[in-house]
Amino acid sequence: MASVSVDEAMRRAVALAARGLGATSPNPVVGCVLLDADGEVVGEGFHAYAGGPHAEIVALAQAGKRARGGTAVVTLEPCDHTGRTGPCSHALIAAGVSRVVVAVPDPNPVASGGAATLRAAGIEITLGVRTEEAEAGNIAWLTSMRRGWPYLIWKYAATLDGRSAAADGTSMWITSEAARTDVHALRGTVDAVLAGVGTVLADDPRLTARNLRDGTLAIRQPLRVVVDSSGRTPADARVRDGAARTWVATAAEVGAGPDGRVDLTALLAELHHRGVRAALLEGGPTLAGAFLAAGLVDKIVGYVAPKLLGAGPTALLDARVTTIADAIDLEITDVTPVGPDLRITALPRKREA
């Protein structure tokens, strides 16, 4: 096999890391490529599930003795602590690698320090290779660890004129089956799905991740969170059906903001404490407006159907924008056809202080 460059190996490691999306939380996604002393790939690995072997351990097992004198190319700084698995820094030292290339330093104070341990053992450390790509692939975990609350995605479905339902309240189905299947795949990548009690009372959603072809539940289910300030969620609501864990978050439990409703910042902090690193906000328009107004939304995924209603509820209410100068500016990062619909992905632009 021909030798590959460190840059090429990191590109492959980033692709490997993506295979763990939706299965590793509360841990990060990580990919690793091991090159022998001649630069040939002798081992590959990724972190496949929480509690399972880390990417470096999988790659080292493949490489065996050929790891000695070689280079480990890793998307995230090797961990330096013992949790459900041992420290990867020690495993790399024991394997006799001579160099470790890292895309992103570990922001988790519990696990960080691997680079210093490796350097102290005489191993050459290179930082910052394909950092932007590795950050993008691990954005939810990195963001959550750096600030202490989950990466929040607001998902909505609407007609081309922004309506989430018709004037009579009907909303099944605004978007196509292809779009709904895409949403269930999106649910499978997060740790929690949030909805307001108004949506629960109006639509009685399940908020589970399902295979729409046969209706079966995905093996891994996100936590269902009902933001319910005064505890109005009915006992027989489908979010209480036992198909997945459910938390009805009330103001009495979480804490109330100035308006008497659930304090959204406190809610996100509690979700982080419960191991949630990425969350999907699904309904409804009032809750979405509150999160956006508070600057707590990190990404927006909108499914826009080629329909016009002209009347009916809108997808967003009261984001505290009263004049065009206060509009929430977005950076559109992707537009993809999904069946007859469009999936638009955008990032809120950070406002200058």
Image: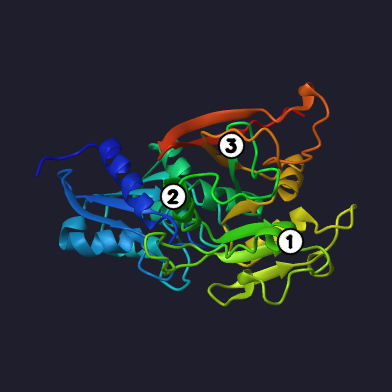
Q: Which residue sits at x=49%, y=51%?
A: 183
Say which mark, if any, is on residue 197: 1
Mark 1 → mark 2, Cα distance in angstroms: 25 Å
Q: Which residue sits at x=72%, y=63%?
A: 201
Observer-nearest of 267 and 301: 301
* Label 1 crowd bin: few (<14), some (14–19), many (20+), radius 10 Å: many
Q: Residue furthest top?
A: 325
Mark 3 → mark 2, Cα distance in angstroms: 15 Å
Question: Does the residue at mark 1 contact the one at mark 3 (Cβ under 8 Å)?
Answer: no
Say which mark, if any, is on residue 177: 2
The amino acid beneath tag 2 is: Glu
List x then y, in percent, for residue 215.
42, 66
Q: Secondary structure at mark 3?
A: strand
Above or below, comparing residue 14 to residue 184 in the picture? above
Q: Secondary structure at mark 1?
A: helix
Q: Secondary structure at mark 2?
A: helix
List x then y, in percent, for residue 89.
39, 60
The amino acid beneath tag 1 is: Val
Q: Which residue is mark 3?
A: 159
Q: Residue furthest left?
A: 1
In terms of sequence position, does the residue under pointer 1 or pointer 3 come before the other?
3
List x then y, in percent, for residue 252.
84, 69
The amino acid beneath tag 3 is: Thr
Whether residue 240 sits left or right of residue 93 in the image: it is right
**In this rendering, which labeled residue sits more in front, label 1 or label 3?**
3
Whether residue 194 sits left or right of residue 289 in the image: it is left
Q: Which residue sits at x=59%, y=33%?
A: 308
